[in-house]
Amino acid sequence: MHEPAANRRYRLPPPLFDARCKACWLVAGVLALVVASFATLDLHLAELLAPDALASMGRFLAEFVPPDLGAPFVRRVVIAAWETLAMSALGTLLAAICGVLLALPASRLYAGDAARGRGAARWLLNALRSVPELVWAAMLLIAAGLGPFAGTLALAVHTSGVLGRLFAEAIENAPPGPAAALRTQGAGVARVFLYATLPQVLPQLMSYTLYRWENNIRAAAVLGVVGAGGLGQLLAFHMGLFQMHKTATVLIAMLLLVALVDGASYAWRRALTR
Amino acid sequence: MPVTAAAAARRDPAWLGRLGWMVAALVLLWPLLVATEFRPWSLFDAEAARVTGRFIASFVPPAHSSEFLWLVARETWRTVAMATAGITLALLLAVPLALLAARALSISAVMGRMAPLPFALRQAVRIVLIVLRSVPELVWALAFVRVVGLGPAAGVLAIALTYGGMLGKVYAEILDSGELQVTQTLLRNGASRLQAFAYGLLPQNAAELTSYTVYRWECAIRSSVVLGFVGAGGLGQQLDSSLKMFAGGEVITVLAVFVALVALADRLSAALRKALG
């Protein structure tokens, strides 16, 4: 006769599904979501993988070579790349300034600080942050018109939200000693911040800002697709006219720009940690 | 003495240096201001201010007809479905490529240096992953819209390629960065690479891999909204068409739904990642 093992650990493995097993429900939920997604989207993936669709995709890719490397067009691409770089740099700088200004009301500066605007300021920061740059750009086009200015403002608005939140955390987590020393001497709020808190958190604020700049260069490269200047605008323009050789040049410039920034930030961080 | 002690204490001793840095920064900033056509006053000239004012005024009341809300609900589901389908396809791409790229699963590396051919293969796969993820998803979407036409397929494929690259690279890094002893013992004793993965690497790294995937799903929801702007369907496309019609009420409704969706996905993914530990 088959006796169950005396020790629980040596019995048969647990059944695959058990109503109390959270992981099973999670897996079932994820599977249901995936099936529902594919079922409702009518993607026609089978048609996409059909031979003639693949052939047309191949023809499309073949149109990209050779990239247009004529001097006048390369000059335009270089100008657009510089515009992208300038948009990202200025946008990040504006965002850092606005970020500090918004982080101050959004943080509790000392233990007994009533910080009345904290909830509202944090709500504002979250709202700025959760709308992507591209959406801001599309909306700001109405006010600022086509061109890099709208893109710069869009980057600044979105990044202010991101940086403001990070800055507020940094300010709240700064060691309170120096600020308390100045406050007990009767220094005003502005002086306490400028001479005690800011010097302490400045390195952290700088590193957050540089990190966001890196992100913003990528974002600035594609913002132009909605008409906000830089490489993206050139890309959307030439792709719209099916000038694939020129599109290829712009794409290469985009990839080079991003690779350059990645390399620079990698080297920078290695130099800092060494 | 012309300056009293009190007055000296009031003056910032480093003011000259600070002023110098500020002037230098402004000089450096000038070309940036020129390149970005930075003209804030243009926001306030009569014509622009009138258009902006009218647009902002049309925000209230937000569009709330049941017909429009129904449309928004359908587009919201589309956005979630695009992100989910995109991530699923990305996994199909990322998992095999990550297994190919992971150094931890190299049999020759167990004994010392990796053999030249496997090394070349791993580098090649890595380069493929880097190319896939460094083309922004919006550019993939623009290209796919040309090939497969307007609609969610372009967005799903764009997400699949970009996120396939990202997930593959990070998966390989996660697999390589853990404790390799178990895996290497299995490989030394004659286990195949897949066995070593299934019994050594996967149990060790499952939680981290899952939590990264969930985080990327959340990011995919955000980016699927952006993809809508080039015609890939979902909330983004709705927002784009409302903006083009200057329908402020619709814009504000779609934005509110989008912000709520992102917040919800954020909460859900944070809770899942916390449960995974």
Image: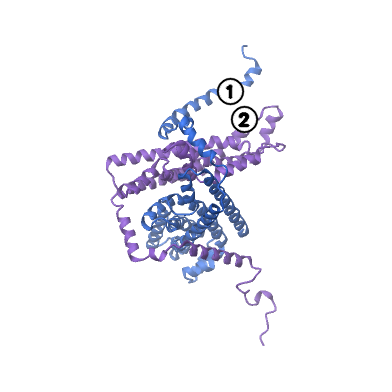
Q: Toward which corner of the image does residue A187 lie, by quadrant?
A: top right
- In the image, is residue A238 above or below residue A180? below
Cα distance in 3D space between marks 1 and 2: 12 Å
Pair 1/2: label in front: 2
**The residue marked by circle 2 belongs to what chain?**
A
Name the residue tied to disc 2.
A195
Task: From the viewer's perspective, tell me whether residue B149 is left or right of residue B15.
Answer: left
Q: Position of residue B274 (x, y in %)?
A: 62, 56
Q: For the residue marked with disc 1, what is the amino acid?
A: Pro
Q: Position of residue A49 (x, y in %)?
A: 38, 65
Cβ–Cβ under 8 Å for marks 1 and 2: no
Residue A2: x, y in percent? 66, 85
**Quadrant assignment, res A221:** top left
Per the rendering, the mark at residue B1 is: none
Q: Look at mark 1 in the image and give the residue it sits on.
A: B13
Q: Amino acid at mark 2?
A: Tyr
Q: Nearer the viewer, residue B224 or B124?
A: B224
The single residue placed furthest to the bottom in the displayed view is A1
Q: Chain B rendered in what hue?
A: blue
Question: Chain A's colour?
Answer: purple
Residue furthest top in the image: B1
